[in-house]
Amino acid sequence: MRPDQHRYLAEPPDGSAVPRVVPPFIASLLIGFFDPHNATFVRSDDAIYPPDIARHVAHGTRALVTCGTADTNVPCRTTPPLLTALAAARTTGPGLRILASLEHFLHPAGAPANDQMIAPAAQRALHDFVRPWQHLTTS
């Protein structure tokens, strides 16, 4: 985004009384999305291919991969390369857990995006993952 573009989002470039292109709060939101720091994060985040990282996980590392059948961000059909890489690294653990009707944030499909509670199926998968260490937390 050019330095002068954020100004145009909130007010006309010539300073006239023409109505704003977008309300100021929307302009601030857009500026946040397209600022250089966020763009760098998005590019770097997208540059990571999880199977490439998984191939280097230490042998014997306990791994859990969850797949929500309602996840449109990372659909279940995309997990085989990750699972193959984890198997090649000889990881252990519960491995893949397919979570029926859960979306990307481990909520039931259709739940509010800011819902803070993860679904019971996701909780069970996490409990299975930590089970080997459970004895360390009981007195």
Image (tube, helix red, strand yellow):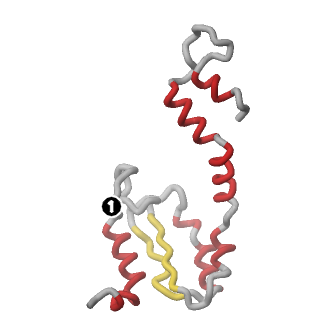
Q: Residue at x 39, y 76 (%)?
A: 125
| Vertical comparison of 109 with 78: above or below | above
Q: Mark 1 sits on what residue?
A: 117
Give me the residue at 56% from left, 66% from top.
77
Q: Residue at x 69, y 54 (%)?
A: 43
Toward which corner of the image does residue 34 lie, by quadrant? top right
Count neighbours of disc 1 (C-alpha within 10 A) and say few if under 14, some if 14 to 19, many if 20 or more. few
Q: Nearer the viewer, residue 100 or 35?
A: 35
**Compared with residue 67, is residue 56 higher up or lower down, i.e. above or below?**
below
In the image, what residue occupies the spot 64% across and 12% down?
Answer: 15
Extreme residue in the right direction: 2
Instruction: Indicate the position of residue 136 as horizontal and vertical percent values.
Output: 35, 90
Q: Amino acid at mark 1?
A: Met
Quadrant position of the C terminus in the picture: bottom left
Badge 1 marks a residue whose secondary structure is loop
Quadrant location of the N terminus in the rendered image: top right
Image coords of residue 113 (percent x, y): 40, 50
Tell me: residue 51, above or below residue 131.
above
User: Residue reaching furthest left?
Assistant: 139
State the image coordinates of residue 9 (x, y, percent, origin top left): 60, 25
Q: Quadrant of residue 21?
A: top right
Q: Position of residue 123 (x, y in %)?
A: 35, 72
